[in-house]
């Protein structure tokens, strides 16, 4: 029952170099698979490398950064090996991206119609007439009222929610097979957040796209995703089906995340934050990146970095507890029992 | 838009009135009686009184000012005290020479400055960037009369490629335009670079890349248009400096422009010509700034003019 995999990221590593040439490994071992038509959530705190992972897929990382290793197989083509021209023909066409800040992600000096038209022109060679028809169709699709007037407006004339809809319309212009949404709702009001997520979900079903949803919000993951990759310190620490992740999280970090999240289905008096801070990207722990904050950490965890191990059910976890080398309490239960519903 | 332009034109009236007051006061604040100057040192008092009467200098100052403004609006600045020709006749041909020099120099500054600035920004920290910024610093620090003399030394005297003086033929235009335009080009290059760098790091540039646009399209269509506002401001300010710089450049290259005329007539105390010249420069400057303001509206749709 193997599903068709549209995107397969294998051991991706992306580094940046500061002025002194010091290498900063922003993404250091990210692997996940995305079956066609499904949604993958990438979750993590700020600085965990989730946005850099997304930007790496389209090779949009800044000039002082580069993909240092790994593969990004999109329909079995390795995106890391494509020429600049070939990757350009994929951007905005087969793979589109929407960003966190709708307020600043649109060019202030061009009408939204013109900005959408650009993608239609370069990828589909549409003329102005065809373009106009398609733009109106797209704006209707994302729920923008009176599209014919709207397309002549400038970004500053639109609210944040409307601008994010425009971004989505722009991303959908060429019927992408994969949509990458980098925290698409973080900058929006709560009510608008729900609308945008619902819009992405319904469009996905309608158009049969695959989606990567990058977020720090497990609530968003629960609502929208089929699979989740949890990131910590530039690495994927756990990859699971969503239901399994919430029911049976394996990595201590995932458990910590769940415990620090308010839930309405379980009666909890107090939230339990993860103690300590995210390690500095310039000074990563030698062993498991989470070891300094992990309640179960042993000698082994501190000295040696665990591999991302694949289990029979397709899930993956990067933790010594699940390996034969585990030197701690063999009966250790990672799940916090009191909070199980 | 039309409403905005009309309103800005009306706003110019007090500005120009202020300029007129200052220009008019020049004559009255300068020590010495103009009638004495015209009549000569040893003229009898009757002659002086007669000249005063002819020029209206015996009337109260507000009345004189009223006449000055009334005539100036009709572009009548009286006659030169030195040559007795109408001031407009003297000034007009000279004004066009200076205007040409200023416009060519401005075009030179804009083309060279923006091209260099864009290259610098797009290839930040490359050898091209470093070279452009060093040359710009050089161009900025160099007084233009000295640059003019050096250019003349190399290209006219040593190499004999271009004529050292005069104005009119294409060969005569090259050296003065480079002399006058270099510092402007340097300022524009630096402003273009910093403005472009600022814009290139904006989110919407990343959006443009994510759309699959070519770098060239991103640089010229998406980045440059956003970067233009501060550049246009600097261009407007440069134009004012250019008119002042023209005085020196004209002297170096012996060009019979307005700058040279004003300097000559200041030394000769020929006030009507000086007044008219300064007023013309002020009016041009004010209108250039109006053009800059109007261009903002086209460049940035967020600026609300009404």
Image (tube, coloured by chain):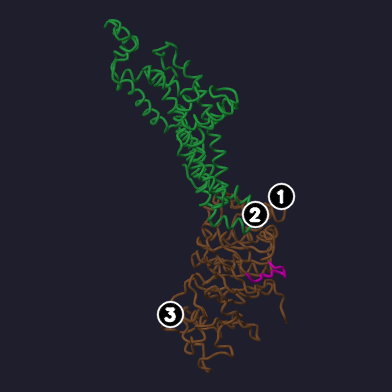
Chain colours: A brown, B green
Say which quarter of the image contains residue A209. bottom right
Say which quarter of the image contains residue A323. bottom right
**Vertical order, A76 against B293 (above or below):** below
Of A2 and B83, nearer the camera is B83
Instruction: Report crowding for label 1: few under 14, some 14 to 19, many 20 or more residues within 10 A (C-alpha).
Output: few
Q: Secondary structure at mark 2?
A: loop
Query: Which of the numbered marks, if any, corresponds to residue B213?
Result: 2
- Indicate the position of residue A329 as horizontal and vertical percent values: 50, 93
Residue underneath mark 3: A275
Q: Are marks 3 and 1 in contact (CB under 8 Å)?
A: no
Q: In the image, is A96 to the left or to the right of B266? A: right
- Indicate the position of residue B252 as horizontal and vertical percent values: 48, 25
Query: Which of the numbered marks, if any, corresponds to residue A127?
Result: 1
Magenta-colored span: A69-78
Of B69 and A23, nearer the camera is A23
Residue at the bottom extreme of this rendering: A331
């Amino acid at each position: 029952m193997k599903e068709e995999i549209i995107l397969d990221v294998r051991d991706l590593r992306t580094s940046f170099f500061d002025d002194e040439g010091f290498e900063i490994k922003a993404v250091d071992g990210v692997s996940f698979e995305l079956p066609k038509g499904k949604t993958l959530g990438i979750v993590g705190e700020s600085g965990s490398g989730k946005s850099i992972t997304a930007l790496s897929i389209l090779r949009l990382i800044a000039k002082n950064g580069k993909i240092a290793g790994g593969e990004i197989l999109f329909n079995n083509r390795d995106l890391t090996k494509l020429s600049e021209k070939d990757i350009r023909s994929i951007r905005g066409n087969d793979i589109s991206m929407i960003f966190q800040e709708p307020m600043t992600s649109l060019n202030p000096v061009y009408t939204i119609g013109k900005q959408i038209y650009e993608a239609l022109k370069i990828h589909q060679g549409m003329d102005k007439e065809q373009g106009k028809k398609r733009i109106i169709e797209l704006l209707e699709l994302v729920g923008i009222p009176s599209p014919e007037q709207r397309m002549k407006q400038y970004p500053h004339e639109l609210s944040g929610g409307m601008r994010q809809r425009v971004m989505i319309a722009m991303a959908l212009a060429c019927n992408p097979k994969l949509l990458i949404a980098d925290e698409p709702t973080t900058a929006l009001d709560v009510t608008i957040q729900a609308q945008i997520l619902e819009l992405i979900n319904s469009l996905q079903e309608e158009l049969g796209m695959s989606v990567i949803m990058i977020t720090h919000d497990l609530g968003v993951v629960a609502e929208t995703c089929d699979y989740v990759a949890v990131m910590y310190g530039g690495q994927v620490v756990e990859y699971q089906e969503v239901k399994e992740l919430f029911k049976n999280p394996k990595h201590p970090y995932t458990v910590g995340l769940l415990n620090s999240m308010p839930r309405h289905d379980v009666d909890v008096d107090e939230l339990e934050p993860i103690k300590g801070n995210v390690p500095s990207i310039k000074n990563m722990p030698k062993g498991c990146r989470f070891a300094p904050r992990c309640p179960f950490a042993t000698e082994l965890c501190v000295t040696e970095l665990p591999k991302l191990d694949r289990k029979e059910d397709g899930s993956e976890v990067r933790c010594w507890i699940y390996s034969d080398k585990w030197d701690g309490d063999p009966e250790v239960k990672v799940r916090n029992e009191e909070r199980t519903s | 838009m039309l409403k905005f332009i009309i309103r800005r034109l009306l706003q110019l009236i007090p500005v120009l009135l202020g300029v007129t007051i200052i220009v008019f006061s020049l004559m009255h604040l300068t020590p010495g009686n103009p009638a004495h100057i015209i009549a000569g040192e040893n003229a009898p008092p009757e002659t002086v009184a007669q000249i005063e009467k002819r020029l209206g200098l015996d009337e109260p100052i507000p009345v004189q000012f009223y006449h000055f403004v009334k005539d100036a609006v009709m572009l009548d600045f009286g006659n030169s005290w030195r040559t007795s020709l109408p001031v407009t006749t003297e000034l007009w041909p000279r004004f066009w020479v200076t205007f040409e020099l200023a416009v060519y120099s401005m075009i030179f500054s804009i083309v060279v400055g923006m091209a260099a600035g864009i290259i610098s920004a797009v290839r930040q920290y490359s050898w091209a960037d470093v070279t452009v910024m060093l040359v710009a610093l050089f161009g900025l620090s160099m007084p233009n009369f000295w640059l003019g003399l050096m250019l003349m030394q190399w290209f006219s005297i040593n190499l004999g490629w271009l004529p050292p003086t005069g104005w009119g033929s294409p060969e005569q235009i090259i050296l003065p335009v480079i002399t006058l335009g270099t510092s402007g080009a340097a300022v524009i290059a630096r402003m273009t670079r910093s403005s472009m760098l600022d814009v290139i790091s904006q989110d919407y540039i990343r959006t443009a890349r994510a759309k699959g646009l070519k770098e060239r399209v991103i640089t010229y269509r998406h980045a440059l248009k956003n970067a233009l506002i501060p550049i246009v401001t600097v261009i407007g300010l440069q134009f004012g400096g250019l008119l002042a710089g023209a005085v020196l450049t004209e002297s170096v290259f012996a060009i019979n422009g307005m700058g040279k005329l004003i300097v000559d007539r200041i030394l000769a105390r020929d006030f009507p010509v000086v007044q008219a010249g300064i007023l013309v420069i002020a009016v041009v400057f004010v209108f250039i700034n109006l053009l800059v303001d109007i261009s903002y509206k086209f460049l940035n749709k967020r600026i609300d003019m009404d």
